[in-house]
Amino acid sequence: MKTILIIEDETQTRHLFLKCLEFEGFRAVGASDGTTGVAMAQQHTPNLVVCDIMMPDMDGYSVLSALRKTRQTALIPLIFLTAKVTMADLRRGMELGADDYLTKPCTVEQFLAAINSRLQRQEQLSKLYADEGSHPQEPSQASLSTNIFPVEPKLANVFCFIEAHYQKPISLNDVAQNVGYSPAYLTNLVQSHTGRTIKQWIIERRLAEAKTLLATTANSIRQIAEASGYSDAGYFTRQFRQFHGVSPQAWRQVSVSETTD
C-alpha cells in the first residue's frame, strides 16, 4: 500500500483529500502545517507528498527545501498545491525540485490523476534503476538516433519519448502525460532548460529525419513527409521552407550536389 502525505493548512481541503485517497486504497496521512509535514515525511517516508504553498508557519517552498536536504526524503516526489501559479512560482519550484503543480480549486479527478501519474512515473524510474543496477539517475540519452537533443538529465525521458514517437501525431499533452508532468509545468521546465518548446523539439526532430531521408533516399516528398511524421505533404513542405529557407526539393538538390562534388 502506497503512502501519500498531504500538507495542507485548510482543514476541509485536507480532510477531503485524505478521504479520497483512502477510498482509492492509499494509506493517507495529513499535516496541518509545514513543520509537522516535514516531521511526518521523515517518520513515514511516504511515496509522494502533496503540499500547499501558502501556509502560515512554513511555506511550501521551505518544506520542499527541507525535504530535499535530507537523504531519507530527498527523492520523494512532491506536488505543489496553489491557488495561483505565476511564471516566477513555476521557476522557483523547478529550481527546488518540485515535480508538478495542482491549481486550487481542483476536482477530485484532477487530484487523483496527478498523483497516479506521478506514482507511475516513479515506478518506471525505479524499474529502470533496478534494470541498470545503478544508483538513481535519469535515463541516458546515448541510445537516441540523433544528436539534436541537448544532454539534460531532467529532460532525458522527454526527449526519449519524442524520439520514439515523433513519426506519430504527438502533442504537448501526450508528452506531459507520458513523463508525468502537467503541460504547464513541462512547458516551463523545457523552456527554462533549453530555450525552446516541446512543439519546437518535435518539429526539429521530424525535420532532422526528413533531411536524412532527402539526402540518402530517392523517396518522393510525400513518402518522406509521411516517414517524418507529417500526414500532409504540403504542410511539411511549408514548414521545411520556414525552418530552412528552401523547399525540400531544393535542399535535396544542394545536398546531393555537395555529396558528389
Image (tube, rainbow, N blue to C red):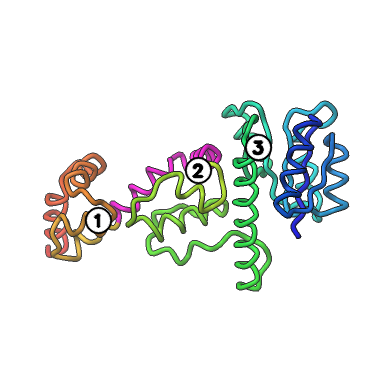
In front: 144, or 106?
A: 106
- Extreme-front residue of the structure: 23
Q: Is residue 108 magenta?
A: no
Q: Which residue is mark 2?
A: 190
Residue at 36%, 55% (x, y): give it.
166
In front: 109, or 200?
A: 109
- Horizontal and vertical percent for residue 62? 78, 36
Q: Which residue is mark 1?
A: 210
Helix or strand or loop: what does disc 1 sit on? helix
Q: How far separated are the C-alphas under marks 1 and 3?
A: 37 Å
Q: How far separated are the C-alphas under marks 3 and 2?
A: 14 Å
* Crowd tier of the residue under label 3, counting other residues whose Cα lies within 10 Å: few below 14, some 14–19, many 20 or above: many
- Horizontal and vertical percent for residue 126? 65, 64
Amino acid identity at mark 2: Val
Determine whether label 3 and label 2 are within 8 Å by CB: no
Label 3 vs 2, first from the N-terminus: 3
Residue at 57%, 29% (x, y): give it.
87
- Horizontal and vertical percent for residue 225? 21, 54
In the image, which residues are magenta? Answer: 183-208
Name the dominant secondary structure of the magenta segment: helix
Helix or strand or loop: what does disc 3 sit on? helix
Is residue 94 found left or right of 13 in the rendered image? left
In front: 152, or 229?
A: 229
Determine whether label 1 and label 2 are within 8 Å by CB: no
Label 1 vs 2, first from the N-terminus: 2
Amino acid identity at mark 1: Ala
Q: Quadrant of residue 167?
A: bottom left
Amino acid identity at mark 3: Gly
In front: 43, or 212?
A: 43
Q: Which residue is mark 3?
A: 93
Residue at 75%, 47% (x, y): give it.
68
Label 1 vs 3, first from the N-terminus: 3
